[in-house]
């Protein structure tokens, strides 16, 4: 028998990326005992698509850092594309990185062949978005950024230096859809 219904399509789950991020915010507050929260900033991309910029905020110090952004069409929440921040770490501080070989340099110089590009961060359904959202929160760069945010706010042992006010340690402008 033919199957014409789309697989993994759940009409009871129509949560938008914003609604899912609001749920994630509650989990961050609960799991950090109120120390951390997510701040979701609504914006527009350079190509006039809807954009959600996700920041982590250390509540006691009011410091924030940009974690990633999400882009989708203004009139439809899906497909949505999660855009992790660029990893500006030098290779020596990365667990793994890619170093092209000579054959790739020769191919790049010698020809202009097309190739298929797979974007693993594009999500077609709420379920897919939840799965990828979990993955972006578990990236090493995300975890390092969050730990650095909390560590910078914590008083260092043996130091008598006090700081006043709040500081925004944003990780730079979020990637904008190209």
Image: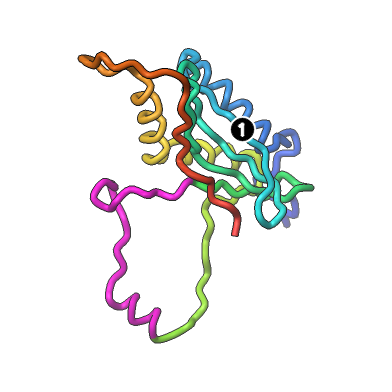
Q: What percent of the width, then of the height, locates residue 49?
A: 70, 51
Find the residue positioned furthest to the left: 158
Q: Nearer the viewer, residue 48 or 32?
A: 48
Q: Residues within 10 Å of mark 1 (few under 14, many from 20)?
A: some
* Quarter occupied by the N terminus: bottom right
Work out whether residue 78 can be spotted: no
What is the secondary structure assignment of the residue under circle 1? strand
Which range is magenta?
85-109
Q: Nearer the viewer, residue 163 or 12?
A: 163
Q: What percent of the width, then of the height, locates residue 51?
A: 65, 45
Q: Nearer the viewer, residue 53 or 9?
A: 53
Work out whether residue 153 can be spotted: yes
Q: Is residue 89 magenta?
A: yes
* Quarter occupied by the C terminus: bottom right
- The quadrant in which residue 162 appears is top left
Residue 174 in the image: above or below residue 21: below
Q: What percent of the width, then of the height, locates residue 74?
A: 75, 48
Residue 112 in the image: above or below residue 43: below
Q: Is residue 65 magenta?
A: no
Residue named by callout 1: 40
Q: What percent of the width, then of the height, locates residue 112?
A: 48, 82
Name which residue lies at 23% across and 50% down: 92
Q: Is residue 105 left or right of residue 70?
A: left
Q: Nearer the viewer, residue 155 or 30?
A: 155
Residue 114 in the image: above or below residue 138: below
Find the residue positioned furthest to the right: 75
Name which residue lies at 47% across and 34% down: 65
Count of marks overlaid on the render: 1
Name which residue lies at 39% across and 49% down: 87
Residue 86 in the image: above or below residue 98: above
Name which residue lies at 46% across and 20% down: 165
């Amino acid at each position: 028998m033919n199957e014409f219904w789309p697989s993994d399509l759940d009409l009871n789950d129509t949560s938008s990326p914003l609604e899912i991020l609001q749920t994630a915010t509650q989990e961050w507050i609960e799991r950090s005992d109120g120390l951390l929260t997510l701040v979701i900033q609504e914006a527009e991309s350079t190509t006039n698509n809807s954009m959600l910029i996700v920041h982590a905020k250390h509540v006691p110090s009011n410091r924030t850092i940009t974690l990633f952004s999400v882009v989708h069409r203004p009139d439809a929440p899906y497909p949505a594309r999660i855009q992790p921040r660029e990893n500006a770490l030098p290779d020596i501080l990365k667990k793994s990185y890619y170093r092209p070989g000579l054959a790739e340099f020769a191919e790049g110089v010698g020809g202009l062949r097309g190739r298929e590009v797979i974007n693993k961060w594009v999500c077609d359904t709420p379920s897919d978005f939840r799965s990828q959202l979990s993955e972006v929160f578990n990236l090493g760069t995300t975890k390092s950024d969050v730990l650095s945010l909390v560590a910078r706010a914590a008083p260092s042992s043996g130091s008598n230096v006090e700081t006043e006010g709040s500081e925004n340690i944003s990780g730079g402008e979020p990637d904008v859809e190209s």
